[in-house]
Amino acid sequence: MVAIRVAMRFLSSNKSQTALIVVGLAIGIAIQLFVGLLLQNLGAGFIDTVTQNSSHVTVLPGENATQLQGWQDMVARVEGIGGVTGVSAAADSPALLSKGATSSSVLVRGFDFERASRIYSFKKDIYEGFPPTDGSHVLIGRELATKLKVGVGDNLTVVTATRETFDFTVSGLYDLGSAAVNERWVVMTLGASQTVFKFGGNVTSIEITVKDVLTARSTAGKVKSALAGSPVRVENWEDNNPSVFSAVSAQKASGLMIQSFVLISLLIGIASILSITVLQKSKQIGILKAMGIRDRDASIVFLFQGFFYGVLGTMLGTVIGTGLFLGFLKGISASGNNIITSTLNLPFIVGTALVVIAAATTASLAPALKSRRLSPVEVIRNG
Amino acid sequence: MAEPVLRLEGVEKTYLGAVDTKVLFGIDLELEMGLFGSLVGQSGSGKSTLLNVMGTLDRPTKGEVYVMGAPTSGMTKDQLAHLRNEAIGFVFQFHYLLPEFTARENVMMPSLIAGSLSQGEARKRADELMDLVGLEGVKDNPSTKMSGGQQQRTAIARALMNRPRLVLADEPTGNLDSDTTARVYKLLRDINRELGTTFLIVTHDRRIAEQTDRIIEIRDGRISMDIRK
């Protein structure tokens, strides 16, 4: 097709100008991708950090109740809800933990350890010993172990609110990354907790994690519906942490704004460059029209140039942008910071590439129309 | 009698502006097949405007232009473009070659636009035409790396590429020295004889006009003289 042949020749006849435009575009796209990937991963990393080792949706006893009866049936019903990744019943109670003359106020948490591991990263975070496997062992956190000066194999005494005492052996030590949790949580089997605090077969809460924490509120609604008729209340992470949630939302909005402005500046850049090219090449277009090139083909000469700039700029920009991001990650992970995840969001990268190519072609519409309107006689008359 | 290549009926042209300027007044004219004619007139007499109207590059304000018997006033821009590509070749005062392309590619361009010939056929035809106009050694030269005479001969070869019935040439030797001018005119005359192409050459040089078969003179936008030899 003659229009594409002419366009390619226009591009190749001024290689330095073409290269400059492509590099300019590539830098814009690289910034777009880098900022996009960084914000997404920072957001994801931040949310992961904040919400890991916590329940996203929690089922608690209803008013005037302290325990959940029939919880096994509830767990089965909740497990069927889409997006739910972990369901674990807990039998919790405050208590006093003492070793000799030293004691500390703690929260005893009774779990089915396998199920709880889907919510809390105990498996990864036990740095010494093992999880409790029977009713005589407990798992305690790093700060609590330091405070009570105990280690794996040492004995401890749990004192309940009713002044009853129970002896346990430390089976392992954990560090969940939060000093407050490490100092306060004493983990034992569900059965042990139910015995110590006389819960019978009941539990005190059902903890639930979801795939996307930002859907916690809607999942909570589904949980509520699934448990309709049971005397329970359902809480969710989103409502319990409004400031964190609004910070994440604000970060998302600001990221979107930065990306939009980068895209707009790219579009203006392409449109203005091609407008100048139309002026530069108006004589040639006039000559081609005198020779019989159709207006549509004269437009395609410039639309194709926009498309070409878009494709080449996007390819180069994608390589630079993702390279920059990966290099940046490497740099900060070397410094011990792992708040940013390293997901190369492929749909985002491909989507950005397609948007920029489409935008570059669209930006060449105005110059293409200008070329369409160009009259050959004006060029010939004015030389 | 055979249909004339070009026929103008009551053609008028007015440029609209702050002050409207009427350039052509009721021009009636026929160019017969195989003509080697000239259009003469002083600067500002309207000869270039008339040529542009004849070549369908510009539309008349009034009147009708028939190309190969077909009225052009009702044609769309695309239809006119197709007509120009197929039936009319232009040679301008300034060669107007495309600087991004080689001499051969410039010659091939009308055929590439038409899309009627394969790349190989177009190349072969371009080579023949370039041989005809004496450009054997510079076919692959960038169009900017040639002498003025070579550039103008390339423009002539380009005008002939699609075997048009009519070639309109506007002061084709205006920028050339007298020796080259003589060679170019001889070339046009030879092509006229060999291929039967109709030529109308705009010139303000009476000596050149006198070498043609028909001299049409335009004065103040009107045909003041039309002599056939």
Image: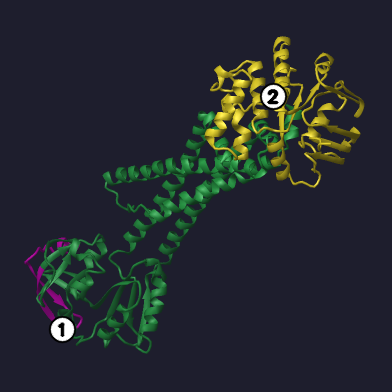
Chain colours: A green, B yellow
Task: Name the image quarter holding residue A364.
Answer: top right
The furthest residue to the bottom: A229
Question: Percent position (x, y) of residue B71?
Answer: 81, 43
Task: Name the image quarter holding residue A181.
Answer: bottom left
Residue closest to the eye, B208 or A258 = B208
Quickly name the residue at label 2. Answer: B194
**Residue in the picture at 55% in, 40% down:** A4
Chain letter of the residue beneath label 2 in the structure image: B
Mark 1: which amino acid? Thr
Residue closest to the eye, A278 or A23 = A278
Image quarter (top left, top right, bottom left or bottom right) of the C terminus of chain A: top right
Residue closest to the eye, A185 or A207 = A207
The furthest residue to the top: B179
Residue B17 in sight here: no
Q: Could you tell me which secondary element the residue under label 1 belongs to? A: helix
Q: Give the crowd class for mark 2: few <14, some 14-19, many >=20 residues within 10 Å.
A: few
Mark 2: which amino acid? Glu
What mark, if any, has residue A195 been given in the picture?
Answer: 1
Magenta region: which residues?
A: A142-170
In the figure, is residue B108 to the left or right of A205?
right
